[in-house]
């Protein structure tokens, strides 16, 4: 019997028991759909994490003040005001790998324009900030050197602030009040979107560092050179961890910490966050992969079960086929092809459903649809393999039947 | 092909013994006979006489425990399974009591089945199946499923299937067992017509009425041939005509 004839006759057999065949396929369908969806969702999530890290600024190390002990109480990380703009300048000046070191202060403020007002955060920055975060002005202009140094009363606003305060109006040149301090809006930042922690990065007003510290968010007069954090951008191609080590050494030295004493600052490396994210994505992927594997095994057992039933039911047909000249190999091939066809149809349905899930998830989560054609091919081939493996024993049993006995079957 | 003088079927001291648990069942206890090309033979005997086993061995569905079976001069008693299947495909056409048609396949598809295993191309299969169905008088029923056909028509489809690979002989096991008398006559007339065209026909039956249409009757009892006689066959076509007159 030719291969094509065998396939056509297997389709006829599958159609003859349509409902049973579909139920048999279910395990394979679920397994394959899980694989396809899993890989697509995993890729999409990774792509989004990458995009978020990119939006924060690539090759970024964030320096934040460490914890301090005050009257016996240990306050959490970030509470000490040990970092200063001088630290930032030193990092930039003394470590060649550092491309930009942006000190910044941050505080919650109420911003008012005309009759509109909006609670947002004000961030005092210097010019390095724009470099460190890869963030450009969309409309208007950046701060001038003069304004950052002297403390000009100018502000750059994020897209969300633009929307909330100005609606559709052009904000450039408008006067806003931030904590009752008047600022002239000189530009609008390009959109950044959500951070990977879910914050709206566009809901922000950027002010010159000096102005912000002295007139808006700075409260600690005694330490008026201190900053909330320093964003350090490492030059492309430099080793992040080596740079981190150098920064640590320099800061310890500047803060006069003797050996054995804890750092009074800490470093956050975006690559670490990325690694953590990827690790959890991998765990998720392994979980789904095991679901898929279990489902494929169960699906395979289901196919084997049904094929055994089918061989028993069709014993007489097998006898007849043998009587008219089917060789044991023909009978074996017929049942193997039938099992494989069921598995492959299940695989195709699974691929369809998996792609559907991937599309819906990508739309809902707002990440790009990434379906690796190789995964589809592998899933398809694998479902075929499941069919072959699970069809083998029933097919073997059918081929081994004695024609006389088989013809006598009811 | 067999030369003149060499019979189509020659069996010598054919034995078939089954082991059923503790018990040894002797189905064939040394059968020797020959069947010539173009003959019409009825094999008779009560159930358990070994006639069905004889038939299965002749049809290469079963193999003898001892003795020799030569088909067209070739020893087929010891062939491996694949070769046996080939022999069944090329040399034997089976007709069963219960027709044994594939229910989900139409008449054409059923008749094509042996050619499928012979590896013939689709076009040739189709042409030969159509010719075979036309030969058995079902030219207008080719696309019918078995369930849409009467018993007699189903048996005709089965006969077309048996003929389609132009086998050396037709083996029919109680071919009229599931049919009424009128339809039985019909089928026997078809066998006689085919026999006149040169097809060797061997019919296994326990009905003397059916055996009457054969020109030779072999009787089995206890795994042995107890009688082997030639006779003038009754003409099924004539009997059919009488029937029509009477009605």
Image (spheres, coloured by chain):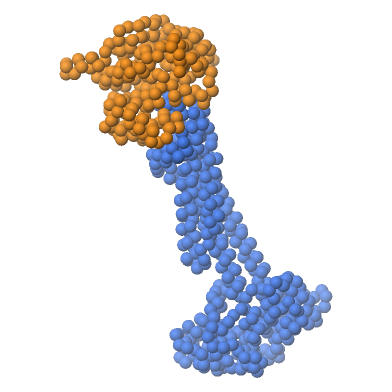
Chain colours: A blue, B orange
Please determine whether, in this image, residue A44 is positioned above or below residue A251.
above
Seen as rendered, the residue at the extreme front is B3
Q: Residue at (43%, 42%) from the top-left corner?
A: A21
When asked about the image quadrant of residue B94, the answer is top left
Q: Residue at (64%, 73%) from the top-left corner?
A: A58
Seen as rendered, the residue at the extreme right is A259
Asked whether, in this view, residue A151 is left or right of residue A138, the answer is: right
Please determine whether, in this image, residue A34 is positioned above or below residue B161.
below
Relative depth, front residue between A7 and A89: A7
Residue B155 percent location from the top left of the image: 32, 25
When asked about the image quadrant of residue B58, the answer is top left
Asked whether, in this view, residue A292 is left or right of residue A242, the answer is: left
Q: Could you tell me if residue B55 is visible in this image? A: yes
Residue A358 percent location from the top left of the image: 49, 60
Q: Quadrant of the C terminus of chain A?
A: top left
Residue B43 percent location from the top left of the image: 38, 12
């Amino acid at each position: 019997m030719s291969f094509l004839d065998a396939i056509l006759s297997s389709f006829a057999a599958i159609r003859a028991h349509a409902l049973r065949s579909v139920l048999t396929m279910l395990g394979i369908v679920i397994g394959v759909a899980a694989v396809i969806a899993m890989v697509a969702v995993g890729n999409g999530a990774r792509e989004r994490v990458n995009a978020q890290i990119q939006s924060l600024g690539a090759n970024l190390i964030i320096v934040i003040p460490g914890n301090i002990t005050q009257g016996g109480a240990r306050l959490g990380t970030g509470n000490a005001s040990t970092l200063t703009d001088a630290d930032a300048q030193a990092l930039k000046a003394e470590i060649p790998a550092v491309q930009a070191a942006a000190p910044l202060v941050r505080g919650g403020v109420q911003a008012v324009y005309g009759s509109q007002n909006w609670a947002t955060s004000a961030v005092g920055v210097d010019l390095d900030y724009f470099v460190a975060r890869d963030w450009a002005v969309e409309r208007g202009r950046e701060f001038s050197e003069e304004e950052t140094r002297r403390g000009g009363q100018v502000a750059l606003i994020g897209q969300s602030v633009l929307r909330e305060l100005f609606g559709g109006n052009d904000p450039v040149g408008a006067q806003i009040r931030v904590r009752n301090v008047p600022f002239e809006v000189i530009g609008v930042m390009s959109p950044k979107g959500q951070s990977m922690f879910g914050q709206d990065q566009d809901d922000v007003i950027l002010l010159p560092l000096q102005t912000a510290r002295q007139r808006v968010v700075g409260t600690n007069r005694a330490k008026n050179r201190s900053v909330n954090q320093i964003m350090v951008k490492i030059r492309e191609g430099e080793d992040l961890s080596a740079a981190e080590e150098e920064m640590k050494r320099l800061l310890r030295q500047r803060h006069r910490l003797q050996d054995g004493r804890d750092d009074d600052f800490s470093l956050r490396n975006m690559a670490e966050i990325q690694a953590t994210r990827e690790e959890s994505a991998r765990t998720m992927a392994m979980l789904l992969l095991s679901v898929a594997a279990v489902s494929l095994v169960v699906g395979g057992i289901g196919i084997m079960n049904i094929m055994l039933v089918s061989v028993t039911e069709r014993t007489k047909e097998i006898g007849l086929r043998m009587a008219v000249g089917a060789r044991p190999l023909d009978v074996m091939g017929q049942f193997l092809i039938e099992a494989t066809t069921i598995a492959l149809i299940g695989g195709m349905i699974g691929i369809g459903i998996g792609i559907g899930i991937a599309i819906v998830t990508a739309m809902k989560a707002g990440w790009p649809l990434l379906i690796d054609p190789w995964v589809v091919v592998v899933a398809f081939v694998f479902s075929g393999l499941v069919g072959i493996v699970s069809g083998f024993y029933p097919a073997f049993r059918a081929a081994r039947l004695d024609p006389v006995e088989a013809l006598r079957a009811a | 092909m067999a030369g003149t003088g060499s019979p189509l079927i020659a069996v010598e001291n054919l034995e078939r013994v089954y082991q059923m648990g503790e018990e040894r069942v002797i189905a064939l206890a040394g059968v020797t006979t020959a069947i010539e090309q173009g003959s019409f033979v009825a094999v008779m005997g009560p159930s358990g006489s070994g006639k069905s086993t004889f038939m299965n061995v002749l049809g290469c569905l079963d193999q003898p425990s001892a003795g020799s079976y030569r088909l067209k001069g070739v020893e087929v008693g010891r062939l491996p399974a694949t070769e046996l299947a080939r022999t069944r495909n090329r040399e034997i056409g089976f007709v069963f009591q219960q027709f044994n048609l594939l229910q989900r396949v139409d008449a054409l598809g059923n008749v094509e089945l042996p050619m499928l295993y012979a590896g013939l191309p689709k076009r040739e299969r189709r042409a030969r199946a159509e010719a075979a169905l036309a030969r058995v008088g079902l030219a207008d029923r080719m696309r019918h499923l078995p369930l849409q056909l009467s018993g007699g028509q189903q048996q005709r489809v089965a006969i077309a299937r048996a003929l389609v690979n132009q086998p050396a002989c037709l083996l029919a096991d109680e071919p009229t067992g599931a049919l009424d008398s009128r339809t039985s006559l019909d089928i026997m007339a078809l066998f006689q017509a085919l026999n006149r065209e040169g097809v060797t026909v061997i019919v296994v039956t326990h009905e003397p009425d059916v055996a009457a249409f054969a020109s030779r009757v072999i009787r089995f009892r206890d795994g042995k041939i107890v009688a082997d006689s030639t006779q003038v066959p009754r003409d099924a076509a004539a009997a059919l005509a009488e029937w029509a007159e009477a009605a």
